[in-house]
Amino acid sequence: MITPVFKREFLGYFRSPVAYVFLIAFLVISVALAFSRYGGFYRANLASLDAYFQFYPWLFLFLVPAAGMRLWSEEKRSGTVELLFTLPITTLEAVLGKFLAAWAFLTLGILLSFPMVLTVAYLGDPDWGVLIATYFGAILMAGGYLGVCSLMSALTKNQVISFVLSLVACAVLVFLGLSGFTDTLAAVFPVSVADAVSNFSFMTHFDSFTKGIVDPKDVVFFLSLMGFTLFLNVVVLER
Amino acid sequence: MIEVKGLVKTYGAKRAVDGVTFSVRRGDILGFLGPNGAGKSTTMKMITGFLRPTAGTAVVGGHDVTADPVAVKRKIGYLPESAPAYGEMTVEEFLFFIAECRGFKGPDAKRAAAERAIQLTHLVPVRRQTIETLSKGYKQRVGFAQAMLHDPPILVLDEPTDGLDPNQKNEVRSLIKGMAVEKAVILSTHILEEVEAICNRVIIISQGRVVADETPEQLRARQPGARLDEIFRTLTLSDV
């Protein structure tokens, strides 16, 4: 019974202007950043998309909460949650259906950046292994962000609160891995503590993907983050 | 078909529903009456498996709602208060979605179920409109269509005629009456004439407790000559 929920949610993005606004904003901003002086796509003179993907953890910080804030808040505000949970569907099925729909939508956005791939393929000879690993990592990371956002969305019927909570929670998970933060931490605590803390960050686990390394431990990090947040999501909704 | 046994729901220190017990048989149209905030909606939400009871349970079509809520949800058609629906969908899209969730497999079966519901609730002229553009009466009918799409043996309707004009009210009442022969129906309302018009049993609930459970005739016989709303007032005085 996941399919009908998934279909309704996924098509729901396209029944309103949300999908188009989101996809265009995401692609314009991400590409503009890559070509900007901060991205330095041309200056690097490399046939790689590092200049493009380095901004993903920061972009996701705003864009994934924007895509995920409505997941449950909207249902609670409009009362349709009562409809949904009096249909013969379990809470887990509803949570998974909605999550997978939003994840598929984000994946679509990420894959729509393919003209960037065509560009580097035209200009040079990119390392396809690295590119595929990076895309894989970006999609996994989007799922990690989204799990957090889905959980936050289930906590409130106000979409603004849902957005802000998601932003804060995701920001914590980004900043834990920032070198400035971990360096400070390492100066006070033993290095092992700093390492342990930065292990909870999106940054740390996304980095190796962008170098072309698909380490099971990074895959497991993102999958277990999704599993954990979705489990809490079910608990919150059944409470 | 519905056995409600000592349902309790507490919110903090407040007991919204305080030991409600009653049963509904096939062919019954049970009018659920009570002042606003007496616990009507909360009771219905517990019977339909949306809210978990603090204590007690309801057995619906042989299934215990606290043990097997999904089985109960299969047997019930539920119209929540103010008929929520996904506004950005058209009537057809919405009913297809409900049909899919209700386990109709294949496009033909889904189409047939949705078509039947559309015909029964007279939604043909608006079938391709998005729900958010519909008038209140049509929205209510969409809620109805959704509730009876799978031809459930049990219907739970929370204020089905609220906000409708007199003609629409009449139509909804005859719809309910027409369907009730082989079903068990619970409907909540605060319109007393509605109870007289279609119900064969009345339960009055006040401060979360059942204060009357009888036929409309018996209710009337409590104070011969008095109007129904006077009887209602006497029974629920503690709530005011």
Image: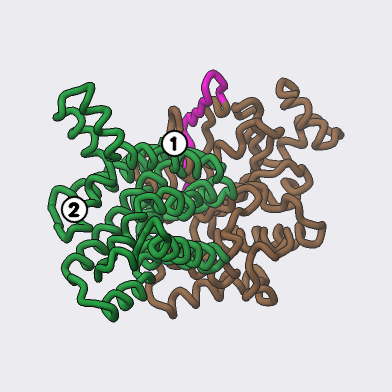
Chain colours: A green, B brown
| Magenta stretch in the rendered image | B1-15
Q: Is disc 2 in the same subunit as disc 1?
A: no
Q: Residue B125: where, in percent of width, then height? A: 69, 76
Question: Most extreme residue toward the top, as rendered?
Answer: B13
Based on the picture, tell me whether residue B12 belongs to the magenta stretch.
yes
Q: Residue B98: where, in percent of width, then height? A: 49, 64
Marks 2 and 1, how far apart in space?
46 Å
The dominant secondary structure in magenta is strand
Residue mark closest to the camera, 2 vs 1: 2
Q: Which residue is mark 1?
A: B52
Residue B139, which numbered label? Answer: none
Q: Which residue is mark 2?
A: A208
Q: Dot 2, crowdedness within 10 Å: few (<14), some or many (≥20)?
A: some
Instruction: Please state which of residues A209 and B130 is positioned toward the viewer in this rendering.
Output: A209
Based on the picture, tell me whether residue A177 belongs to the magenta stretch.
no
Q: Quadrant of residue A191?
A: top left
- Amino acid type at circle 1 is Arg
Question: Does B39 sit left or right of B110 as displayed?
Answer: right
Residue B80 visible in rendering: yes
